Amino acid sequence: MVDTTGLESMLNFVRVNGTVRFDRYMDEHLFSSGRGFYDNAVVISWNGHFTTYAEHPAFAYLVYLAVRSQGMSGKDFLEIGGGSGHFKLFYLQYAPSTKYISVDASQRLAGFQADVGGETFVGRVENMHFADGSINGIIFANELLDELSCRVFKISNEGKRVHIGSEGYVIEESGSLAFTYLPAERDDFLLLYESFLQRFRPRIPNGSVICVSPILPKAISKMARVLGRGKIILMDYGFWDDPSHANHRIYNDVPFFTSDDLRCTLDEALKNPYETDITHRIDFEFAKWIAEGMGFPARLFNIGDYFESFAEVTEGDKRILQRPSISQGIWELTTSISEVVLEITK
């Protein structure tokens, strides 16, 4: 069912702004205060709009083992985009002495996280208020990056030079919202990403479409600024230069998801603002390049290898891992390649 209130609000947004670059539309669609999808509609649960690994206690325990094996258990733990608050709930059960802080752009979701304990703040990752170097331990985010508003670039490549000639915009068309490609806005971020493509993806096929967030460099920079010493651990769906991800690199459309967790078309998403999630797969090689350009060592893993690499299991761990609520998720998580982990060290 179309939400006419949301549609009218977004039509007015586009009318006022004329032609709206897609990332600006996506930001308003998802995060408009009190109206956007994350303040108005989202339900993160098995029976809601979608679920994530963070809803399962096994995921929190494996993250805890990874943190502990690197000598950072009990230190500061800042989670960004904590969603329903279930990950925070589970993690604090395993590491109750942790100074746990969560930050969420959604007032509604931040309320759920605050009910769990620790500290909770409403804010966006690129605008976090924490002092320089004030977090010593872990900065963590699960499925945050694919919610950072993305630009939709169409690639030109005739075998001589990778070029971004056009990008996605949202316009009003006969009283409806429509997506179209127009000449790209050749700002500093476009030049940065184009430079990355020329260096690292010189053979990208002509006509390919890639979604990438202009907020991503700001987000990594902000996380690095507030981190004193420790790790930034970012998990999400995406692609990188690993053979296991070779078939997931380039898409010809942006993935959009409806309330029943099924992919829908772009036109369907634009008909139902504030009720439809919009996500995109992350170019993790670009995120790693950004971190290394700031002088920070960065590594990429698929999620299964990450948990296998860092989980040092004691007899006490084995007893916990054998609990029915946890054991049923361990095999799936430790063998999965469905998500990518970017680990940045400072």
Image (cartoon, rainbow, N blue to C red):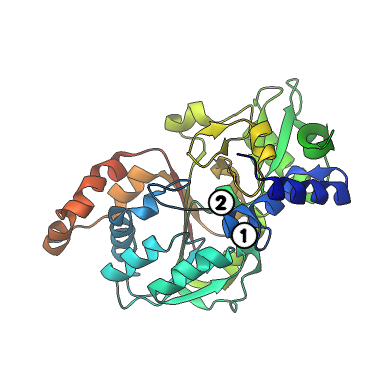
Report the number of numbered marks.
2
Left or right of residue 268, residue 60 in this image:
left
Q: Secondary structure at mark 1?
A: helix
The x, y position of residue 276, in whole percent, is 59, 44
Q: Which residue is mark 2?
A: 145
Q: Secondary structure at mark 2?
A: helix
Write down the quadrant of residue 198 in the picture.
top right
Left or right of residue 102, residue 87 in this image:
left
- The residue furthest top is 158
Write down the quadrant of residue 73 in the picture.
bottom left
| Image marks 1 and 2: residues in contact by CB distance under 8 Å | yes
- Please state, as top left, top right, bottom left or bottom right, where the N terminus lies in the image: top right
Q: Which residue is mark 1?
A: 219
Residue 318's disc is none
Q: Amino acid at mark 2?
A: Leu
Separation of residues labelled 1 and 2 (CA atoms)? 9 Å
